[in-house]
Image (cartoon, rainbow, N blue to C red):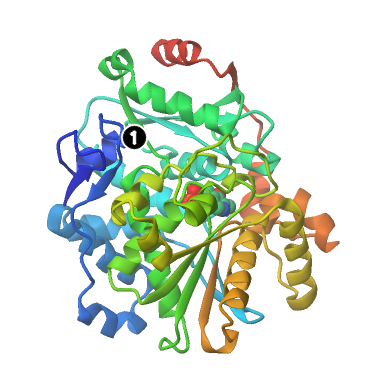
Amino acid sequence: MKLYSTKHISADVDLKEAVLKGLPPDNGLYMPYEINPLPQKFWDHLDSYTFTEMAYHIAHNFIGDYIPSAELNKIIHEAYNFDAPLIEVGDYSVLELYNGPTLAFKDFGARFMGRLMGYFLRNNDKEVNILVATSGDTGSAVAHGFLNVEGIKVTILYPKGKVSEIQEKQFTTLGANITAIEIDGTFDDCQALVKQAFLDKELNEKLTLSSANSINIARLIPQSFYYIYAYKQLDDKSLPLYFSVPSGNFGNMTAGLFAKKMGLPVTKMIAATNSNDVFTVYHETGKFEPKQSVQTISNAMDVGNPSNFTRMMDLYGNDAEKVREDIAAYSYNNDQTADCIKKVFNDYNYVMCPHTAVGYLGLDEFVYENDLNPYYINGIILATAHPVKFGDVVEPLIEAHIHIPERLKSIINGKKQSVLMSADFNIFKTWLLSK
Ligand SMILES: *Cc1c(COP(=O)(O)O)cnc(C)c1O
């Protein structure tokens, strides 16, 4: 599997280098040269596959024989010991992607990446430092994905006071090879610090740095699995298929576009965002203008400069018209999101997290705007997090208590450990070198 940089300056790399480096030195993003359609045989057998069997075939379609099949199978079996059920909610279906250890869809990418890196580093003697900026859920997924993976140290940067208490607990209580840094600033500040570290010559000479954000290609490959898994679960596969994707950095969306390239018959993808609407503005105007992020109740999508936008532009040759053919885009504010959580609970007795609610609104508006009959489509909303993670927002809206899953209870009782730091690159750099 060969990958290129979207900037076309840095040399091509193989999968191991792309995964361990994260970002190419020219500051582009790695993209696979080929995303081949899955063979007809795969689609013919899809109904009989388990999640892991299906995932193996998709991963193999990307990776080929670069990783021995027994190893690839092992990675997939260890990573996916939880399900992604498709649930009917009113006229639509919701794909629940939050049954992993951190109760969010990022477990799909992070658990695969952690094990893939572990495999690539199995004979390494040099420690790898993974730097991650998180607006909430990436941090916990990556922390859990790498917890106790030998030869890897993880540093997580998160904006002070801007993630929920449960999110914070999920990546500050683990200890072992995981360190959390609380940055006095925004998520964009955290992301900028990480980006600058990767471009810093001295740091790269002294340390082996790697990233685990949605910019790492190892997270995108497995995120394509569940789009096809949703399709597998449909009763009538002949109806037009729509996915609404609650989006922030657009990794999830990009993975869906990969699935489409592999032959998943998607009629349209819907990019649903909160008030951080740079993609929606791009969709309307053809102009991409990154902004400061603003804080919302769907905080894992509070992104002012979506990192995977570059990959999407690469897929569509920078042509906004082509983007519009495949993707619709809508944005919603906090009030609209809150009303949707309330309405769906009252109408269908179904509890959504604020991100999922943004996705619900996107599908609903698309259906309305295009005058579609919901009975004659397959409309799927990706449920990206368990509502209990956002209990402080959701519980007052539904006026009910959300049951706390067992796997969360032990985390809530853990003790927070973090390093407080201002958003200053030199301080961050000194800290990294002193470790
Ligand atoms: C990260 C995240 C998103 C946004 O996903 P992207 O791949 O960054 O677009 C949406 N919802 C939740 C709960 C998340 O954690």
The image quadrant that residue 272 belongs to is bottom right
Task: Look at 55% across and 45% down and name the residue there.
Answer: 137
Task: Look at 68% across and 41% down and name the residue there.
Answer: 164
In this rendering, position of residue 155 left or right of residue 409: left
Q: Secondary structure at mark 1?
A: loop
- Of residues 285 and 296, the one drawn nearer to the viewer in this rendering: 285
- Of residues 423 and 157, the one drawn nearer to the viewer in this rendering: 423
Q: Is residue 232 above or below residue 355?
A: below
Find residue 247 and report its horizontal and vertical position in percent. 52, 53
Q: Is residue 247 above or below residue 413?
A: below
Q: Is residue 283 above or below residue 328?
A: above
Residue that sits furthest to the front in the current view:
285
Residue labelled 1 has its Cβ within 8 Å of some atom of ligand 1: no
Task: Look at 44% across and 10% down and name the residue there.
Answer: 430
Asked whether the viewer can see residue 160, the reply is yes
Q: Which residue was labeled with disc 1?
A: 150
In this rendering, position of residue 270 left or right of residue 433: right
Count of marks placed on residues: 1
Q: Quadrant of the C terminus?
A: top left
Instruction: Please state which amino acid type lies under the numbered disc 1.
Output: Glu
Task: Look at 71% across and 58% down and name the residue there.
Answer: 337
Find residue 284 and report its horizontal and vertical position in percent. 51, 56
The image quadrant that residue 195 belongs to is top left
The image quadrant that residue 4 belongs to is top left
Label 1: how many residues lie within 10 Å, few (<14), some (14-19) or many (20+)? some
In this rendering, position of residue 177 left or right of residue 416: left
Find residue 315 and report its horizontal and vertical position in percent. 30, 55
Find residue 37 and report its horizontal and vertical position in percent. 22, 70
Asked whether the viewer can see residue 156, the reply is no
- Of residues 322 and 95, the one drawn nearer to the viewer in this rendering: 322
Q: Is residue 428 above or below residue 387?
A: above
In this rendering, position of residue 64 left or right of residue 47: left
